[in-house]
Amino acid sequence: MPPGADVSLVDRINIEHVFFPIVDGGDIMHIWMGEGSPDAKGLKDFAMNLAKNTQVGYFAFTKDMSVCMDDFHMMAGLKDACENCGSDNIEQLSRVTGYIQAVGGWNAAKKQELEDRKRYNSADMV
Ligand SMILES: [Zn+2]
């Protein structure tokens, strides 16, 4: 399913999980998260439910982050300026093909995908 498809998390899972048994490798379900910090127990319960009750073989929760390169202040989400010192010397981080990387090195297509991603928060994980 396209990362930007405007579907609920439950619908995304129900559509994507049927493909896991027929794909041999490189299959992962990405759950792009917003800037919030989900409750740890709720996230664990959701992950256990996903693992036990669906055919999803691999999944990843990804939260975008930004770090100020002047004072190394970490921020949730993709920020253009530091919330601590105001600097615009910011490195944005997110996941691509399995790894958290600096967004600045991504090609134009991946940057567009990053912008398009449908993000879910803890309220979607019930
Ligand atoms: Zn800063």
Image (cartoon, helix red, strand yellow):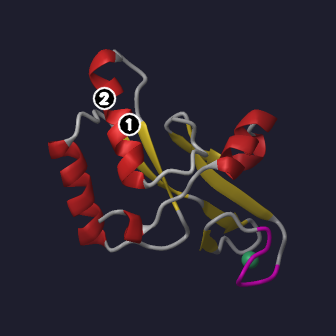
Residue in view at x 21 percent, y 44 percent: 51
* 104 to the left or right of 64: right
Q: Residue 115 colored magenta?
A: no
Tag 1–tag 2 contact (CB < 8 Å): yes
* Residue 55 percent coordinates (x, y): 23, 33
Q: Answer yes or no: disc 1 within 8 Å of ligand 1.
A: no
Considering every residue shown, the one lying at the far right of the view is 88
Q: Residues within 10 Å of mark 1 (few under 14, many from 20)?
A: few
* Residue 85 percent coordinates (x, y): 77, 83
Quadrant in which residue 59 is drawn:
top left
Taking depth in this image into account, of 68 and 54 the one nearest to the observer is 54
Quadrant in which residue 111 is drawn:
top right
Residue in view at x 29 percent, y 36 percent: 56
Q: Which residue is mark 1?
A: 15
Q: Amino acid at mark 2?
A: Val
The magenta stretch is: 80-86
Residue in view at x 74 percent, y 39 percent: 106
